[in-house]
Each structure stands twice: as structure tokens, then as C-alpha cells.
Image (cartoon, grey):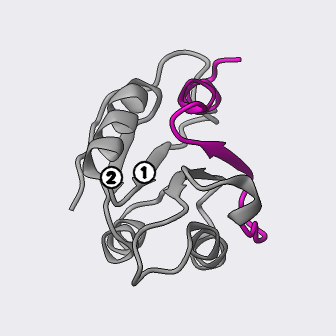
Amino acid sequence: MGDSSSEKPASGSAEMVGSRHNTLLVVDDEPRICKHIARLLEKSFDSVHTATSQSEAEQVLGEERVTHLICDYNLGDDSPSGTELISEWRGRFPSIGLAVLFTASAAFQIKILPGVDKVFFKPKDIPKLIAMFSGGK
């Protein structure tokens, strides 16, 4: 399974509501990307998990109350697209409040389905992704 952190979020970040526990799941078939994004956001969440496959992600989603999700568009040839997974997971796991797609694919190649809140492109949108999830502007 993926890495996790128990750092408390920084003031004004990751949308803390009351005593709600904010949990981020980063799903990407490239472990170094998962770890990089998780490291950049670990102080903005109560816990951060990573997964490199659909099955790992579903294990985390079944065990944790994930509130924020970052999912790669292409998790490999044997996996549905990230948009399909986000759409399915939002239906099965209602704790997911914000779900974004992170992709290296060209925009015209991506079919966006209901449940995807925003699309970010690798690597150029990493600062925008981090700003959105850390409470930055």
C-alpha cells in the first residue's frame, strides 16, 4: 500500500471544516510522482496516501475516509481511465469532496465524465495543483 502522513494541515489549507479529518489519496502508476505530490501536500492534510494501481486505490478508499483525490488519467493498459475511475469512485465513496485528474495526455484525448472537478496537466500544472490543494491561490 502507499505512504501516509499524519501531519496536521497548515492554517487555511485543504478546507478544514470543524473537526473534519481531511485525507488525500494520490493515484498514479508512477511511484515517484505519487511520492512527489504527496510530499508537497503532506502538511495540508491530516493524512496522505498513495496508490499506484486501481486495486491499491480501492483498498485505501475502502479503509480510509478519503476527502480529496488526485488521479492520473492513464494508470496502464489494463485499467480504466482516470475519468472513469473518478466517476465510479465518487458514486461508491461519497466522502470524496474534491476529485481532480492529473494527466500527461493531450486535452483532445481526454473524455471527461461527471465527478471530475478539474483537470491538471503534467508537469506544467504541478504548481497550480499544489496551490489548489494547499489553499494557495
- Badge 1 amino acid: Val
In this rendering, is residue 4 above or below 14? below
List the residue tagged with mark 2: 50
In this rendering, is residue 136 above or below 130? above
Residue 1: quarter of image: bottom left
The span from disc 2 to disc 1 (Cα, nearest Å) is 5 Å
Secondary structure category for the residue under label 1: strand
Q: Is residue 32 left or right of residue 112?
A: left
Q: Which residues are magenta?
A: 110-137
Q: Residues within 10 Å of mark 2 (few under 14, many from 20)?
A: many
Residue closest to the eye, 89 or 119: 119
Residue 17: quarter of image: top right
Percent x, y for residue 100? 63, 51
Q: Residues within 10 Å of mark 1 (few under 14, many from 20)?
A: many
Q: Please indicate, yes or no, whether residue 67 appears anywhere in the rendered image.
A: no
Q: Which mark is residue 120?
A: none
Secondary structure category for the residue under label 2: strand
User: At 56% from the left edge and 52% from the top edge, which residue is drawn?
Assistant: 103
In this rendering, is residue 89 above or below 67? below
Q: Is the C-beta separation of discs 2 and 1 under 8 Å? A: yes
Q: Which mark is residue 26?
A: 1
Percent x, y for residue 50? 32, 52
Q: Is residue 131 magenta?
A: yes
Q: Please indicate, yes or no, whether residue 7 appears anywhere in the rendered image.
A: yes
Q: Is residue 131 left or right of residue 123?
A: right
Q: Is residue 37 left or right of residue 66?
A: left
Residue closest to the eye, 49 or 79: 79
